[in-house]
């Protein structure tokens, strides 16, 4: 119940999270809250869909819903489809003749409801300077509703009746129109004729307010040369006919469980309690600045945080009867999705230094296993078929990021900057080795052979270090790589990440939160004319090329004065995508693919339901996707979600609460751990959140989470060199502190010991 409630709040875009403690506020305030709806001052005229964010979801065979159209609308679907049958001049709606009834007509289930919603969204008033044409979503009034009409009976007669049925929407000016087959004017509703809809009733018509479902598989044939986006803004085909049977076992076919993965890599008998909290995806600022004259690429972001706790053997139970836990590790990761790229960026990672309290601490690094496996889990649950994925981080040594005061713990050790970069390169390497290398061959047969498998390449840039020095950070295995097929490169993967490699340098570098690159980019943007990045050439005055940008990075304070910062990328290409191929542009139109198999770990297509069987999703013989615009930017796999799924406001509240705790000694850390765990459970509306994991690995040296790639570690992990009198065999595990950016301001992200106010030690 708690999970469903959290999901519903998030899916309804209720961004204000009110703490439960406020429910018992003053009686006067509660009276106002209860009675303001009676006052006209607080009535909101267009509140019918207020708080519902449109999402790129198509409600296939929409008439199957308990309440057609309205159910899809309540879940933010931007596209609905109805099968229509013409009998005695009336259009009935249903899957087949046996499902038709007198009451279920195209007019009653779609035309009238859509018209009613649009009338609510476009009320008349004295403040209007011109008539409005708002769409069905109050949160995004410019979003058109795609109304698919599948003609089941004779095409000419049926579609003629469809055109006539659109008259109420036409009279109000609510339909997307084309003038002279040249000028498109988008309206609140875009009608797409499919099924038996005749092309010659659409394509040759110069002035119209309906469109044609283009044959995607044969668009390049001469017979279809006349089909343009003004005729077919959406194209479709049978997925199995065009592509063939596709096995999605790589990598999403396995239902991945984080606890099971960790159990397979942790030494036998080691017990950890993990808590994975995540947020629902929300629209985000684009990672890459748009080229001059273009709009920013639609982008979504979801947050993930993993904490790991131990229960020291000498600790009793707390006041609530539960065993006393103490956090030993935490990592925050941001996952960005666009139409053609998934970016996994490690925001923060840190340890408290209390891992030594674990009885019989193993020789191998438990913290490394935690990091590797968690990132492995996110990579394999977020890899989309045909979409490139990149794991990104910058390695910068700091003493604490997530646990204030933890640097005062003498058991916590932090690597220097050089050791940190090497650690991360070694951490990236195991998962890199699970994929085929790229040869960069231009031979067609070679390309076809390579594209049949997943491939990956790792990239490293250390500003102020030349290529020879940078190779010194590569893992030892890189020395034995084939020179014609290198796995590690001292370069920036521009063509793999950027859809327009020829754009100005400011458009070619991603802008992550609290990232040294981002701060430099912002400073350089001050050089643009009148600070307007969208006007002119978009070129800076001082830095003219990407090579010069990286060269100048070495003079930045964060990368100079004896300090090194490493920027790492692991680019993973699914089958059909070559590393040597550049990113695709995201400016084409909506595409429909029929018979498309859905990955086993993909999320339900509605963001509200956690249960796929209860969600609005593509079914039957069609799946509509939007790989070329904000349609496919939204991706929320079911298996990639946390033990608690919170809306963005609650997620930030949980992280901010953690940043307000103290971890300077064992007693205080235990209290802070208990407070944080309770806070997360309260936000999730559950009594307890988490999962106990017991290690099963017989070989302590094993670092690969079964069943596939060994691990992705993506946060600046740092470990000090072992002291001579304390060999690793002693069982003392190193602590880590990492950061690759943060969703918090930089002053919060880096928690210097002298900036943290601590409680008095007693």
Image (cartoon, rainbow, N blue to C red):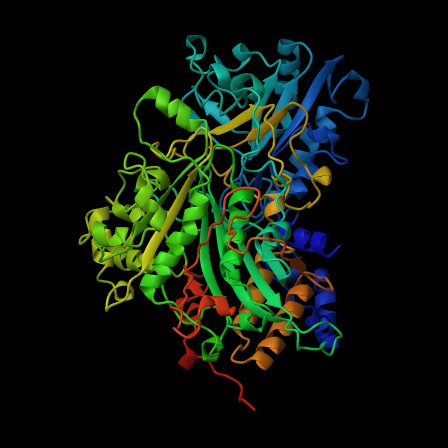
* Left or right of 168 on screen, residue 664: left
Q: Position of residue 24 (x, y in %)?
A: 74, 74
- 689 or 52, which lies in front? 689
Residue 121 in view, yes or no: yes
Above or below, comparing residue 193 to residue 292 in the picture: above
Tell me where residue 237 sits by quadrant.
top right
The residue lying toward the viewer, choosing from 245 and 700, is: 700
Q: Quadrant of the C terminus?
A: bottom right
In this image, 553 relative to 71: left or right?
A: left
Above or below, 51 against 752 in this view is above
- Numbered-mark total: 0
Which quadrant is home to the N terminus?
bottom right
Query: Residue 603 occupies which quadrant of the picture?
Result: top right
Indicate the quadrant where residue 34 lies.
bottom right
- Relative to 221, 667 lies left or right: right
- Looking at the picture, how far across and down is residue 584, in whole percent? 39, 33
Q: Nearer the viewer, residue 310 or 106?
A: 310
Can the viewer see residue 286 in this picture? no
In the rendered structure, the answer to whether residue 608 lies left or right of residue 221 reads right
Vertically, is 130 above or below 724? above
Instruction: State the image coordinates of residue 544 (x, y, percent, origin top left).
Output: 19, 48
Residue with the most extreme bottom position: 762
Name the residue located 70 percent from the left edge and 67 percent from the top edge: 33
Task: Give the x, y percent position of residue 697.
Answer: 60, 53
């Amino acid at each position: 119940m708690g999970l469903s409630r959290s999901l519903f709040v998030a899916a309804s875009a209720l961004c204000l999270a009110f703490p439960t403690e406020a429910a018992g506020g003053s009686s006067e305030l509660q009276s106002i809250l209860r009675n303001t709806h009676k006052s006209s001052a607080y009535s909101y005229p267009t509140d019918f869909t207020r708080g519902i964010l449109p999402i790129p979801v198509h409600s296939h065979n929409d008439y199957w819903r308990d309440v057609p159209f309205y159910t899809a609308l309540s879940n933010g679907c931007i596209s609905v489809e109805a099968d229509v049958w013409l009998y005695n001049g009336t259009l009935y709606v249903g899957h087949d003749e046996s499902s038709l009834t007198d009451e279920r007509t195209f007019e009653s289930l779609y035309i009238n409801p859509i018209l009613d919603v649009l009338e609510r969204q476009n009320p008349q008033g004295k403040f209007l300077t011109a008539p409005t044409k708002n769409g069905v979503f109050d949160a995004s009034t410019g979003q058109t509703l795609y109304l698919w009409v599948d003609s089941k009976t004779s095409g000419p007669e049926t579609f003629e009746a469809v055109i006539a049925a659109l008259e109420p929407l036409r009279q109000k000016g609510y339909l997307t129109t084309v003038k002279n087959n040249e000028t498109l004017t988008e309206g609140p509703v875009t009608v797409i004729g499919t099924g038996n809809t005749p092309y010659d009733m659409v394509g040759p018509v110069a002035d119209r307010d309906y469109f044609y479902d283009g044959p995607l598989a044969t668009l390049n044939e001469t017979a279809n040369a006349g089909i343009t986006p003004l005729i077919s803004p959406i194209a479709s085909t049978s997925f199995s006919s065009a592509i063939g049977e596709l096995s999605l076992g790589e990598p999403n076919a396995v239902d991945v469980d984080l606890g099971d993965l960790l159990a397979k890599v942790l030494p036998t008998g080691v017990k950890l309690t993990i808590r994975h909290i995540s947020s629902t995806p929300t629209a985000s600022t684009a990672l890459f600045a748009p080229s001059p004259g273009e709009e920013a690429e639609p982008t979504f972001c979801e947050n993930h945080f993993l904490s790991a706790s131990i229960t020291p053997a000498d600790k009793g139970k707390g006041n609530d009867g539960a065993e006393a836990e103490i956090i030993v590790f935490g990592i925050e990761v941001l996952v960005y999705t666009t139409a053609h790229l998934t970016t996994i960026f490690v925001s923060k990672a840190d340890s408290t230094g209390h891992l030594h309290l674990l009885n019989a601490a193993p020789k191998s690094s438990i913290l490394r296993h935690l990091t590797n496996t968690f990132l492995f889990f996110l990579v394999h649950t977020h890899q989309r078929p045909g979409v490139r994925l990149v794991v990104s981080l910058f390695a910068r040594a700091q003493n604490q990021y997530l646990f204030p005061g933890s640097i005062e713990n003498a058991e916590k050790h932090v690597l220097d900057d050089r050791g940190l970069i090497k650690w991360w390169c070694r951490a990236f390497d195991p998962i890199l080795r699970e994929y085929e290398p790229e040869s960069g061959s231009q031979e067609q047969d070679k390309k076809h052979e390579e594209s049949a498998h997943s491939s990956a390449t790792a990239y490293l840039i250390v500003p102020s270090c030349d290529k020879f020095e940078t190779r010194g950070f590569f893992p030892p295995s890189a020395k034995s790589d084939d020179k014609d097929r290198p796995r590690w490169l001292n370069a920036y993967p521009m063509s793999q990440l950027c859809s327009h490699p020829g754009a100005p340098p400011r458009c070619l570098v991603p802008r992550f939160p609290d990232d040294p690159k981002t701060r430099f980019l912002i400073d350089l943007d001050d050089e643009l004319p009148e600070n307007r990045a969208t006007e002119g050439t978009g070129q800076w005055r001082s830095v003219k090329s990407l090579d010069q940008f990286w060269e100048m990075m070495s003079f930045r304070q964060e990368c100079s004065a004896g300090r090194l910062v490493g920027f790492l990328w692991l680019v993973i290409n699914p089958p059909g995508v070559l590393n040597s191929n550049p990113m695709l542009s995201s400016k084409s139109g909506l595409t429909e693919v029929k018979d498309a198999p859905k990955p086993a770990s993909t999320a339900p297509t509605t963001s509200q339901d956690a249960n796929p069987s209860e969600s609005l999703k593509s079914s039957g013989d069609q799946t509509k996707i939007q790989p070329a615009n904000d349609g496919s930017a939204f991706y929320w796999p079911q298996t990639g979600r946390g033990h608690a799924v919170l809306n963005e406001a609650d997620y930030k509240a949980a992280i901010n609460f953690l940043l307000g705790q103290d971890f300077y000694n064992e007693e205080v850390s235990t209290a802070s751990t208990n407070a944080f765990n309770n806070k997360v459970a309260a936000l999730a509306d559950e009594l307890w959140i988490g999962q106990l994991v017991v290690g099963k690995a017989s070989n302590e040296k094993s670092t690969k989470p079964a069943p596939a790639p060994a691990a992705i570690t993506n946060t600046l992990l740092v470990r000090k060199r072992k002291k001579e009198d304390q060999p690793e065999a002693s069982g003392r595990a190193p602590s880590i502190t990492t950061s690759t950016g943060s969703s918090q301001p930089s002053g919060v992200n880096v928690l210097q010991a002298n900036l943290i106010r601590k409680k008095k030690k007693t």
